[in-house]
Image (tube, grey):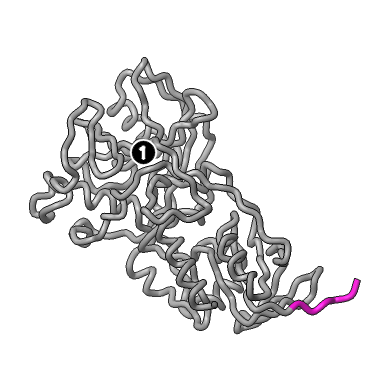
Amino acid sequence: MGQALNSFDVVILSVDGRGISLANQLAQTKKVAFIKAFNPYVSEDLEGPFGFFIDSVRPSYWEESPDGFSIKTLEKSFHFKETLLSSVYQERIEYQNLLSGSLDHFKDNWLRPLLVQLTTGVDKPLNDMKNSDVSFVFKDFGLLKHNSQTLNSGISVFKGNDLNFDDKLKCFSHPEFGEIKSRELVCLLNPEEARRFNEDFYHIFFSKSYAHPYWCWQRLTFDFEDEGYPVPVHLVLADPNDIPWDHERLICLKKSLAVENHMSVWMKIPYSSCDFEESLQKINTTLKKYFPNFKWSCQSDGWETPTCLWPVYSKKGLSQMQLKSPVYYGWSAEDLSPNGFFSREQNILKSLS
């Protein structure tokens, strides 16, 4: 088989269908190639620990479910929907009451820092969060479902295995298809995924030395008996009197809609090392503290989520990873919400159109 030369206006490096909408829009006027970096994640990992935020601008590849989500403290439970918080005890309070003020009165204004924790891949001290913008969270609540899309027939698709790159990321060498040349590269991988994809690519893509994430979100699967208590589909366990929010002090629960009494349990753990058995014991203690009448049974033999999928970086670590120009990058640690990703896609589209 001869080595064909493939030249494209834009090459998109993706995983799990990220950027399909962008590729289809660009393909209306440009020759586009789509590289699948590695095998897709399972759906529970893809949605992640906080897949319940969406802005009033709805990307076509996300659809909304009316479930909303809840935050349970040791004293109360709040259900989030539209612009009001209402607890399961039918109390209603305007969300501004919890968002206003400063961290000098943290006990009465704890919601803003908590929501920032759930929408960012940057490890921030509580004091840095007091002015963070979380208003988008309250425009429309809905548990996000990934809506499958397909690439247009005119887009060339390549698997990322065994690709080699030149030092300008303009030419890729594929063992089956030969050279793949591109005028522009769009990367939709986070830094950890880029490193998993190809170490050489990572070191070309980022102009400074590699920095490990500080934390990463990990998932376990539990079965539970609920004793008749109505468990929300998506529930965050956190208490303003129990900080900092990491390890077992911040747990996200996602109830399966397909398997009865089945729950994904997410916890933020140190990236470098975290003893599984010790963490499991802490999770069990937390679950029993919030749900004393429930029976929980872990079905996981170890952490289930690839460490590269939901990393959390220190500010210093992020500053060490400066992109080489010109590369279009669709990931931002500052905003992990679907709307943030959609906005970056639109900026890329505008720049390349």
User: Which stretch appears magenta?
Assistant: 1-6
Q: Report x, y in % for residue 312.
A: 39, 58
Residue 212, how many percent across, how many down? Answer: 44, 64
Q: Residue at x 42, y 49 (%)?
A: 217
Instruction: Please state if 6 lies on the left or on the right of 238 as rendered.
Output: right
Main secondary structure type of the part rendered in magenta: loop
Q: Measured from the top left, where is residue 57 in percent x and y?
A: 40, 56
Residue farthest along the top direction in this orientation: 227
Q: Is residue 32 left or right of residue 311?
A: right
| Residue behind mark 1 | 68
Q: Residue visible at 72% across and 66% down?
A: 154
Residue situated furthest left in the rendering: 104
Q: Secondary structure at mark 1?
A: loop
Is 3 colored magenta in this rendering? Answer: yes
* Between 76 and 52, the one nearer to me in the picture: 52
Compared with 13, 267 (above or below) is: above
Q: In the picture, which quadrant includes the C terminus? A: bottom right
**As rendered, which of 51 and 25 lies closer to the eye?**
25
Locate residue 239, reporting x and y percent: 22, 39
Residue 70 position by quadrant: top left
Please, which residue is most extreme toward the front here?
28
Residue at x-position 44% and y-position 53%: 58
- Residue type highlighted by circle 1: Gly
Q: Is residue 271 visible?
A: no
Pointer 1: residues within 10 angstroms few (<14), some, or many (20+)? many
The quarter of the rendered structure image containing the N terminus is bottom right
Asked whether 143 or 235 is in front, the reply is 143
